[in-house]
Image (cartoon, rainbow, N blue to C red):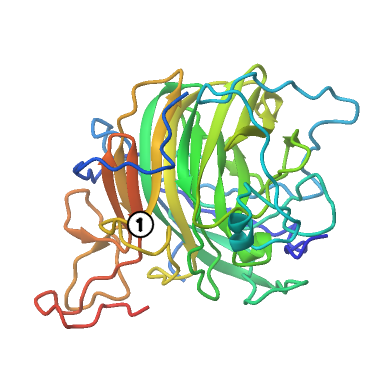
Amino acid sequence: MSNSRRGLLAAGLAVAVVGTMGTVWTLNASAEETTEAEAPAAAVAPATTETAPEPAETAPEAASETAETAPATAETAPEAPAAGEAILTPPKLLPWGAKPKRLKQAKAGASSKAVAAAGADAAPADTSGAVTPTREYAPKGGQGPNGAFLKSARTTVVPPTPPTVGTVKAAAAADRVVNFHYAVGAQTGETDGTWANLTIEKPKLVDGDYHTLAELAVRSADSKQTVEVGWTVDRSVNGDDDPHLFVFYWKDGVARCYNACEWTQIHKTVKPGDTLPVGTSKRFGIMHDGNAWWIAYNSEYIGYFHDKNWEGRFTRAGLAQWFGEVASPSLTPCTQMGNGKPASDGDAARIGSISMTKGPTVGFELDMRPKYKVNLENPVPPVQIEKPDEPYWSPWTGSLRTPTTFRYGGPEYPLKDPKDPESEPIVKC
């Protein structure tokens, strides 16, 4: 048993969904940026959702609808694979065309800083010797059953207060609201998957907030089926403030769980939930091959989600996304996204070398959510815009640096007096 929180296996989430997908913001490309990571190819307010970014030619928002979803619990989720079931053979090449090479593992229980100092790719989060990941139930943003980006949700999970060493206290609370915040790049088009380089960061997770993460995702054309992989700082899931590897999937718009629901582990040492090296850049990939969606981390496949999870209905993606995400009870959180630096800073977190597998040429837009109305008289609490062409502000920033690379981060709050650069921001973190 790790120092990760294990008592939330039946924690429920209820989600209300509004709208359809639509784009309201495009950022201009600027000077080209290159990094070592970019190797050549080889809810207090009503719980609602926010529409997901999509190319500008999408239809306008549709009338709202609501839906209720809940994650599978330990009692209801089917096991994968079943006893005696054959394990699939991974593809011979990684999504980016390279041959797999052995991942380097650091000492079990090592911190993210120690993993980086060892020049390793990952380390077991504890010293139990477990070779399979553990299911973790906690809030997760993304897209709900009607294809809309989740704006908020209700949960019984209460994030533990740091530090959490050895055990994690987690109490149940009825009708607790969690708001989701995003900096998203998205592209439609049929594809067998996507891959990208993500800088591994250790953003500040404020007490009482749920998580801050970066990821890539592939979704079905109707956005109801999803596979995700990335890194997350989440005390409820991981028990500490370090970045950890995670996987996640959705079926018919219903969130499953972190790291182990219907997941087949094939790597003998590196698994979802492992601690990742802060301050480095690693390559993450999702690719459909044979009868499964395979997850690649840096230089090897670590496991897969079998097609049977969707009854064979999800074998190609219709939408790929790359984004940062913060989950917080607050509409104006101080938890950092990326590494906390704004996208205008050259040292801000990056998602780069974005590519598609047997898909369209990469060309995407960035979108920051939520978007708040400009109200200089009463800026807090903020109110979200109602029309795409309304003036707005967002705590999150994004900057498209090349056609396949963007920086993202925040929060960055506007000044109380925009004409006075010495005035304080409307939210002081």
Viewer-nearest residue: 52 or 264: 264
In the picture of the structure, the residue carrying the numbered disc 1 is 348
Q: Quadrant of residue 277?
A: bottom right
Q: Given the current orientation, which residue lies at the most extreme right position?
A: 84
**Can see residue 33?**
yes
Viewer-nearest residue: 64 or 334: 334
Residue 289 % position (x, y):
61, 19
Report the number of discs: 1
Q: Given the current orientation, which residue lies at the most extreme left position?
A: 419
Residue 358 % position (x, y):
46, 17
Vertical position of residue 323 compared to residue 43: above or below: above
Quarter of the image with the C terminus is bottom left
**Can see residue 139?**
no
Determine crowd level at label 1: few under 14, some 14-19, many 20+ residues with C-alpha closer than 10 A: many
Local secondary structure at mark 1: loop
Q: Is residue 277 left or right of residue 34?
A: right
Q: Given the current orientation, which residue lies at the most extreme bottom position?
A: 423
Residue 397 % position (x, y):
30, 56
Viewer-nearest residue: 376 or 70: 376
Q: Is residue 33 left or right of residue 417?
A: right
Quarter of the image with the N terminus is bottom right
Q: Residue at x 58, y 25 (%)?
A: 94
Vertical position of residue 58 compared to residue 170: above or below: above
Q: Quadrant of residue 244?
A: bottom right
Viewer-nearest residue: 221 or 20: 221
> Mark 1 belongs to which amino acid?
Ala
Residue 172 % position (x, y):
69, 71
Q: Residue at x 81, y 45 (%)?
A: 131
